[in-house]
């Protein structure tokens, strides 16, 4: 009887294995109260992650062990994202069919999108809407070996993994938590990481498609290195110190924005079917991730593409424990994963 009078608590941990390190967000839901309680980071040495691949598995395993050994975590749901790139999320429309036929058609669709045999992919889907003559689905496809690796890393660390998600969906969970699902028209989320940017398209609040592209903050570092004649470490340090005020800074920033814009167009083209009957112009861009901390990134993007560009936390930063946006940007995927575990 007394248990029924207590406010139910639900705690979740989101773990993002990124190129810069292991990021953990702890999220608590207690009744109507929802709050991010803690953020944790374990930096990786250079070379642990490269080109969307985990090159130092032992280092990642030790980082997971270390953070669970040194931090005091309450019991809760552990949600992690598949590390690396090559994740595809796409809304598709198919004729109405039975389950067996549907599985085959979805597999063929994923195979075409990846240029990989469907047996090499883990494919999942959910039926969003079903009419008399068609059905709309949201399909997620990720290389099978990356899913196996993610599970193995936590198994070797001796940590129970409850849910394995993908970064695009984690970002969408965060976006909706901040109220982005109430926006009309076409919105784009850019999570700019060290070597990979996750692009998520949202139409009238619903996830349309998403892809991970190999353009990230390292591109800027390499440009600075070349233009200024610096070492990689010196260029990385300069990037964090208002490099846009340097002689070559604005030119480099513009080149980076153009590269992102090219990838953005490719993702848009991949979901053009859903944009034929609506206004297909991007109304707004929300950015996050470590690469989003580049000074004047928003201004450069707006000037180049004539579209509003703002930090994703511009939607509702008050819901995220009062932390500065500069802190939250680095944890966006981990935050989205923890929200998935505690709220959804």
Image (cartoon, helix red, strand yellow):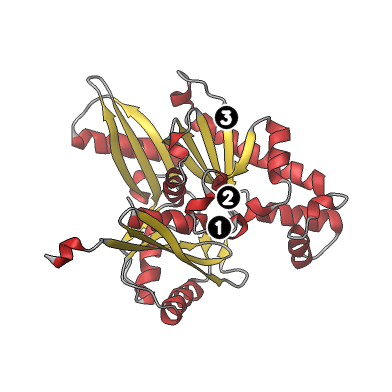
User: Is the C-beta separation of discs 1 and 2 under 8 Å?
Assistant: yes
In the rendered image, the vertical position of residue 6 relative to residue 174, given as above or below:
below
- Residue 283 circle label: 3
In the image, 194 versus 84, the foreground residue is: 194
The correct choice, above or below, for 88 with respect to 221 in the image is above
What residue does disc 2 label?
288
Q: Crowding at label 2, few (<14), some or many (≥20) Cα neighbours within 10 Å? A: many
Where is residue 213 shown, x and y percent of the image? 56, 46
Q: Could you classify mark 1 by the number of other residues whose Cα lies within 10 Å: few (under 14), some (14-19), or many (20 or more)? A: many
Q: Is 27 situated left or right of 104 in this image?
A: right
Q: Is residue 145 visible?
A: no
Is 236 left or right of 215, judged from the image as shown?
right
Q: Secondary structure at mark 2?
A: strand
Density class for disc 3 (Cα within 10 Å; few <14, some 14-19, many ≥20) is some
Q: Residue 324 in the image: x percent, y percent?
A: 60, 58
Mark 1 or mark 2, earlier in chain = 2
Q: Is residue 182 at all visible to an observer of this figure?
A: yes
Determine whether the residue tagged by mark 3 lies in a helix, strand or loop.
Answer: strand
Q: Is residue 176 above or below residue 128?
A: below
Q: What residue appears at the point 46 percent right and 57 percent down from the top-left corner?
A: 335
Give the image location of residue 59, x and y in percent.
51, 75
Q: 80 left or right of 238?
A: left
Residue denoted by label 1: 328
Q: List the single residue furthest toward the bottom.
A: 70
Asked whether the beta carbons under mark 2 and mark 3 sit within 8 Å of each other, the answer is no
**If you read the primary sequence from the N terminus, does the residue marked by circle 1 or circle 3 appear first?**
3
Q: Callout 1: helix, strand or loop?
A: helix
Whole-angstrom CA distance, mark 1 to mark 3, is: 24 Å
The spot of residue 274 in percent (x, y) is 44, 25
Estimate the spatial distance between the alpha carbons at disc 1 and disc 2, rounded to whole Å.
8 Å
């Amino acid at each position: 009887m007394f248990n029924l009078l207590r406010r139910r608590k639900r705690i979740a941990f989101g773990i993002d294995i990124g190129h810069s390190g292991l990021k953990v967000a702890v999220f608590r839901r207690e009744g109507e109260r929802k709050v991010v309680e803690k953020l944790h980071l374990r930096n990786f040495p250079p070379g642990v992650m490269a080109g969307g691949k985990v090159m130092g598995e032992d280092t990642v395993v030790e980082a997971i062990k270390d953070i669970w050994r040194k931090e005091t975590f309450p019991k809760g749901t552990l949600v992690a994202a598949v590390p690396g790139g090559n994740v595809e999320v796409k809304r598709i429309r198919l004729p109405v069919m039975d389950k067996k036929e549907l599985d085959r058609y979805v597999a063929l669709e994923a195979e075409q999108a990846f240029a990989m045999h469907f047996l090499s992919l883990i494919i999942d889907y959910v039926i969003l809407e079903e009419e008399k003559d068609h059905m709309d689905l949201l399909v997620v496809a990720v290389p099978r070996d990356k899913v196996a690796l993610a599970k193995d890393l936590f198994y070797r660390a001796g940590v129970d993994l409850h849910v394995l998600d993908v970064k695009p969906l984690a970002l969408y969970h965060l976006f909706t938590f901040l109220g982005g699902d109430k926006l009309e028209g076409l919105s784009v989320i850019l999570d700019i990481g060290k070597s990979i940017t996750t692009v998520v398209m949202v139409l009238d609040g619903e996830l349309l498609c998403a892809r991970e592209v190999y353009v990230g903050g390292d591109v800027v570092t390499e440009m600075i290195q070349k233009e200024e004649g610096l070492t990689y470490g010196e260029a990385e340090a300069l990037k964090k110190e208002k490099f846009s005020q340097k002689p070559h800074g604005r030119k480099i920033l513009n080149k980076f924005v153009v590269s992102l814009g090219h990838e953005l167009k490719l993702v848009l083209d991949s979901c053009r079917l859903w944009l034929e009957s609506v206004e297909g112009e991007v109304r707004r861009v929300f950015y996050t991730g470590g690469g989003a901390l580049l000074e004047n990134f928003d201004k450069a993007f707006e000037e180049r593409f004539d579209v509003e560009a703002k930090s994703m936390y511009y939607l509702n930063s008050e819901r995220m424990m009062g932390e500065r946006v500069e802190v939250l940007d680095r944890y966006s995927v981990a935050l989205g994963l923890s929200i998935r575990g505690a709220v959804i």
